[in-house]
Amino acid sequence: MPDDAHSPPRPITGLILAGGAGRRMGGQDKGWLPWHGMPLVHHAVACLQDQVTELLISANRHLGDYAALGFPVLADETPDYGGPLMGLRQGLAAARQPWLLSVPVDAPRLPDDLVPRLWAQHEAAPLVLARTPGGPQPVVCLCRRDLLPHLESYLAAGGRQVQGWYRDLPHVWVDFDEDAFFNCNYPEDLQA
């Protein structure tokens, strides 16, 4: 939640990455799968909408359904589900704020303090990444919008791995508890 209920929103565009192929879920659009009685995309919206200035959704299917949530929807430029960096690229290009925070749609337990904890490090580097004891959570990141040309160059050279993109960029890590970014990757995860 914001530090002060009366303070202005941070200059952040939130981006929910919901454009994956859902291969481990039998090809289903994960954003619309129910977790605890609510579609996964609703959990992500609930976490971010009051903590960012604007909210975008990266999706490649059910675009009308996502748009009905009331936020702009961005589709990848290529039809082959090129991975989260394609969604991040679209988000950086569309963002109207100087910072962009991305989260995956399939992480329904995002911490309530995710935005302020990442934002607390924004002056240290142009890229702030989340990490748990289990390892990096590279699609949970806060990045300056002016990193777009660097990302576009990486993609144009054939790069697709998130870790490969940020390897040469100045970045800082913010540590979270192990279950902060629990992912619903398989059907059984929806029952967790």
Image: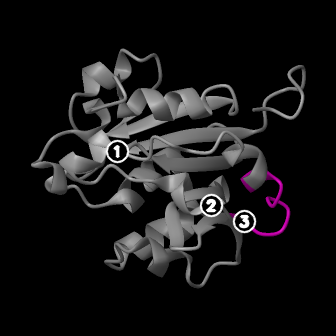
- Quick check: can you spot residue 182? yes
Q: Residue 90: percent from the left, percent from the top?
A: 43, 48
**Residue for badge 1:** 192
Q: Is residue 121 magenta?
A: yes
**Residue for badge 2:** 177
In the rendered image, which quarter contains the N terminus?
A: top right
- Mark 1 to mark 2: distance in Å? 17 Å
Q: Residue 100: percent from the left, percent from the top?
A: 62, 48
- Is 64 rendered above or below residue 161? above
Q: Residue 55: percent from the left, percent from the top?
A: 56, 31
Q: Secondary structure at mark 3?
A: loop
- Mark 3 to mark 1: distance in Å? 35 Å
Question: Label 3 amino acid?
Answer: Pro
Question: Label 1 amino acid?
Answer: Ala
The residue segment tinted magenta is 118-127
Residue at the spot 41% in from the left edge and 61% down from the top edge: 85
Q: Nearer the viewer, residue 93 or 139?
A: 139
**Residue for badge 3:** 126
Identify the main secondary structure in magenta.
loop
